[in-house]
Image: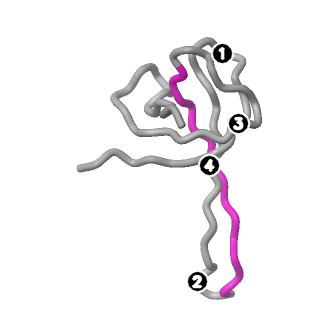
Amino acid sequence: MPKRILQGVVTSNQNQQTVTVSVERRFKHPLLQKTVRKSKKYRAHDEMNAFNVGDTVRIQECAPKSKTKRWEVIAN
């Protein structure tokens, strides 16, 4: 099974080798037919501390790196 890849914006890079990425998804509400925006935050492993707040990054699923990190940043 392939690993999921998501795209989002870095919202925090204060921890060593970790970035917080906010991923937004859009979908149509089943009853109201209005476009709804939902966002979710993921903590991703950033080995070189290369990304700053505001950068658009792609993240990929991986084996657990810590208690909260199950994603890693892919170089764009």
Q: What amino acid type is highlighted by mark number 3?
A: Asp
Name the chief secondary structure element in magenta: strand
Tell me the residue at 53%/30% (across/down): 44
Q: Nearer the viewer, residue 1 or 41?
A: 1
**N-term-proximal mark, 3 vs 1:** 1
Quickly name the residue at label 2: 30
Tell me the residue at 66%/86% (across/down): 33
Q: Which label lies toward us, 3 or 1? A: 3
Query: Within 10 angstroms of label 3, few (less than 14), some, or many (20 or more) residues?
Result: few
Tell me the residue at 33%/29% (across/down): 63
Horizontal and vertical percent position of residue 73: 51, 31
Question: Helix or strand or loop: what does disc 2 sit on?
Answer: loop
Question: Helix or strand or loop: what does disc 4 sit on?
Answer: strand
Horizontal and vertical percent position of residue 24: 65, 55
User: Which quadrant of the view contains residue 54?
Assistant: top right
Quickly name the residue at label 4: 23
Q: Which label lies toward us, 2 or 3? A: 3
Q: What amino acid type is highlighted by mark number 4?
A: Val
Q: What is the CA distance from the residue labelled 4 to the residue labelled 3?
A: 12 Å
Q: What is the CA distance from the residue labelled 3 to the residue labelled 1?
A: 16 Å
Q: Nearer the viewer, residue 75 or 38?
A: 75
Q: Is residue 48 above or below residue 38?
A: above
**N-term-proximal mark, 2 vs 4:** 4
Quickly name the residue at label 1: 15
Relative placement, left or right, of 3 versus 53 is: left
Q: What amino acid type is highlighted by mark number 2?
A: Pro
Q: Which residues are magenta?
A: 33-46
Question: Helix or strand or loop: what does disc 1 sit on?
Answer: loop
Relative placement, left or right, of 66 versus 76 is: left
Reply yes or no: does residue 41 show up in magenta: yes
Please say if the residues under marks 1 and 4 sit with CB atoms less than 8 Å apart: no
Q: Which label lies toward us, 4 or 3? A: 3
